[in-house]
Amino acid sequence: MKSAHVRVDMAKCVGHGRCYELAPEIFGEDERGHCRVLLETIPQHLEQDALLAAANCPEDAIKIEKR
Amino acid sequence: MEANENPCPHTGVLNIIDPEFTAHPQPVYARVLEHHRVAKSIAMHSPILSRYEDVVWALRHPEIFSSEMDMQVLLGTQRPMIPQQIDPPLQTRFRKILDLRFSRPRMQELEPAMRQHAQQLIDGFIDRGACEFDADFAVPLPCRAFLTLMGLPQEELDLFVELKNGIIRPPVPPMDMIAATEYRMKTGERIYAYFEKMIEERRSAPCDDMVTYLTQVELDGRPLTHHEILDICYLFLLGGLDTVTATLGCSIAYLASNPDQRRRLAQNPELIPNAVEELLRWETPVSLVPRVVKQTVKVGDVELREGALVNLLIGAANIDPAEFADPHHVDFDRERNRHVAFGAGPHRCLGSHLARMELRAALEEWHRRIPEYEIAPGAVPHVSPGIREQLHLPLVWKAGAGSAR
């Protein structure tokens, strides 16, 4: 079975912080409040959280890929 | 009734100061979105962008849409406010040192104090069964947060409210622009003088607060200049107070007018964080932000010329059906919500984590104590343009029905 991977375009991130609010097990924050990926390969039970974070990023910086 | 149509269907001129528009902008936004990709402001007919796609594109491209503009007449400033009125790459260097002080964990440290401030304000009027929401809660709460954040005594509250009102709503006859400008310049001088004194005090007696940080932090290996520190403090004062005041007012006005939504929130406080986002989207209290065109560019068929002032109608972008499913439905369970009420791109609101903390804490504390309330019968809401503050929002509830702390 394919697993989901998270990819963040750090050039787009400006620190809205929606991802680490909505999916705190997958995303954290650096000291400026920009996104930091905690889990690159997403366990199945967190896939919904990852998709929610991607759908709420105002900079469209988060992609979830199955591979 | 064509004269009253807003925007004008023939010219695309939007009356941004029409009281009906400021109180209930969404139907007007919908018409702008449908018919006028580039509308015109009633002020100087400057172009207005409103589509989500166009607004976000403009916000992300400061090399085309600059934030550097002379706002002395409107803000009483002698220099641009930092970092709001400067462009990258210098703006980015300032954000790197300021973001550290406005991160989510730092704002969470202020949360217990915020809840206490909210409780104290509610104590002051709960037994009356009535309050003027703006003056009694929405204005003092963010001001107290600002004083806490800056490490200033709460006794300064009246002074700071007076200073920010002196800039945003100078007490002069309406439409007397000369008197308004004079008042703003004088108030601006008082703001600079206040912070000048404070900077001197912190330089000689450093402590663990914001201004001390600004006197010690380095930008590219050098300390900040005296003017730079002043221009940052000026922005904190203007940016930190009115925007949260406006958001609290718009949120409570919505909830007072929609009892089913309010009861659901009061009974399920775990919905409040998502409701805050949805109310930010729907109400978009900072409804419009200005930019200056730096290189001539085309939007649809319209050419935006170098040097032109452009308004980005964020409120309209936030109800654009091309981005939001069922945008006129206020849905506290909305799953996909990429609203740009805090802007987007490099100028994303520096205080957004502070604002979110304040809004959540305030709505939680309010509804725990006063779950049932309504707008006083017969009262007509009075909402200011631009930053949509509910200047007159009298609320009533059953006296004695509120909960103790």
Image (cartoon, coloured by chain):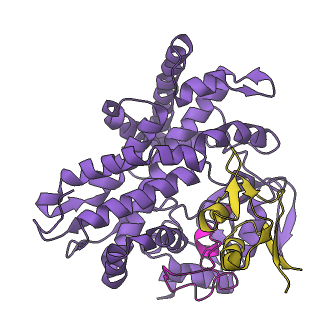
Chain colours: A yellow, B purple
Q: Position of residue B208 (x, y in %)?
A: 52, 25
Left or right of B281? Residue A43 is: right
Q: Position of residue A28 (x, y in %)?
A: 68, 56
B325 relative to B29, above or below: below
**Which residue is at a point 68% across and 75% down the rendered structure image?**
A46
Q: Can residue B69 be seen from the camera position used here? A: yes
**Which residues make up the magenta segment?**
B310-339
The quadrant of the picture occupied by the C terminus of chain B is: bottom left
**Which residue is at a point 69% across and 45% down the rendered structure image?**
A32
Answer whether residue B359 is magenta in the image.
no
B399 relative to B206, above or below: below
Left or right of B147? Residue A50 is: right
B88 relative to B128, above or below: above
The quadrant in which residue B344 appears is bottom right
**Which residue is at a point 86% across and 65% down the rendered structure image?**
B297
Q: B388 or B370: which is nearer to us?
A: B370
Q: Can residue B7 be seen from the camera position used here? A: no
The number of callouts visible is: 0
View extreme (top): residue: B204
Q: B265 or B223: which is nearer to us?
A: B265
Q: Position of residue B242 (x, y in %)?
A: 46, 51
Magenta: main secondary structure equals loop
Left or right of B255? Residue B325 is: right
